[in-house]
Image: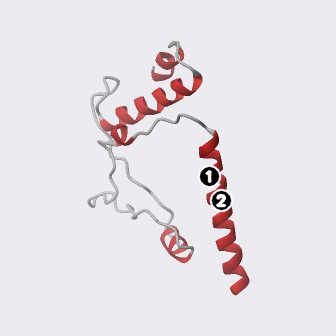
């Protein structure tokens, strides 16, 4: 339903994608007419992710392996409020490339020191 709505607008492709992303977040948050409920949105990392991230100096998500326990990483409810529309794709691609290069340098330096 969301895809059909945004496809039938007169907006540019980028505006349609931004609108669709926002609509999905609003649906997860429970502020959309699509579904009358919100969702718990929590990370589900691999058991080795935390140690790997610590070793490589990057942030990690908390584990939520015990579903019956209080979920530690719930970010649902405000996702659509945190949404920042993309105005241009090129700067984002450059940022991703720069981060990738930085991560590769860290891994290369770490391997060289071992």
Secondary structure at numbered mark 1: helix
Asked if residue 89 is positioned above or below residue 19 in the image, the reply reads below
Colour setting: secondary structure
**Position of residue 70 measured from the top left corner of the image (x, y, whole percent):** 26, 59
**Position of residue 19 measured from the top left corner of the image (x, y, whole percent):** 46, 27
Secondary structure at numbered mark 2: helix
Please give the label number shown on residue 96. 1
Name the outermost residue toward the bottom.
114
Please name whichever residue, 96 or 80, is drawn nearer the observer in this view of the structure. Answer: 96
**Position of residue 93 measured from the top left corner of the image (x, y, whole percent):** 64, 46
In the displayed structure image, the side of residue 78 where residue 86 appears, left or right = right
Please give the label number shown on residue 100. 2
> Where the C terminus falls, by quadrant?
bottom right
Name the residue located 37 percent from the left edge and 61 percent from the top edge. Answer: 64
In the displayed structure image, the side of residue 108 where residue 82 appears, left or right = left
Question: Mark 2: few, some, or many residues within 10 Å (few <14, many ≥20)?
Answer: few
Please give the label number shown on residue 60. none
The reply to whether discs 2 and 1 touch (Cβ–Cβ < 8 Å) is yes
**Position of residue 59 measured from the top left corner of the image (x, y, whole percent):** 47, 66
Question: Mark 1: few, some, or many residues within 10 Å (few <14, many ≥20)?
Answer: few
Query: Residue 37 is drawn in which quadrant?
Result: top left
Please name whichever residue, 77 or 90, is drawn nearer the observer in this view of the structure. Answer: 90
Please name whichever residue, 106 or 41, is drawn nearer the observer in this view of the structure. Answer: 106
Asked if residue 64 is positioned above or below residue 105 in the image, the reply reads above
Q: How far apart are marks 2 and 1 (CA)?
A: 6 Å
In the displayed structure image, the side of residue 10 where residue 30 appears, left or right = left
């Amino acid at each position: 339903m969301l895809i059909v709505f945004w496809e039938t607008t007169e907006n540019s492709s980028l505006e349609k994608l931004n609108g669709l992303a926002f609509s999905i977040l609003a649906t997860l948050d429970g502020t959309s007419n699509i579904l009358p409920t919100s969702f718990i949105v929590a990370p589900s990392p691999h058991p080795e992710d935390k140690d790997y991230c610590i070793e490589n100096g990057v942030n990690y998500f908390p584990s939520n392996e015990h579903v019956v326990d209080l979920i530690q990483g719930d970010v649902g409810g405000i996702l659509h409020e945190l949404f920042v529309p993309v105005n241009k794709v090129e700067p984002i691609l450059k940022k991703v490339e720069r981060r990738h290069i930085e991560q590769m340098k860290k891994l290369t330096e770490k391997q060289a020191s071992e």
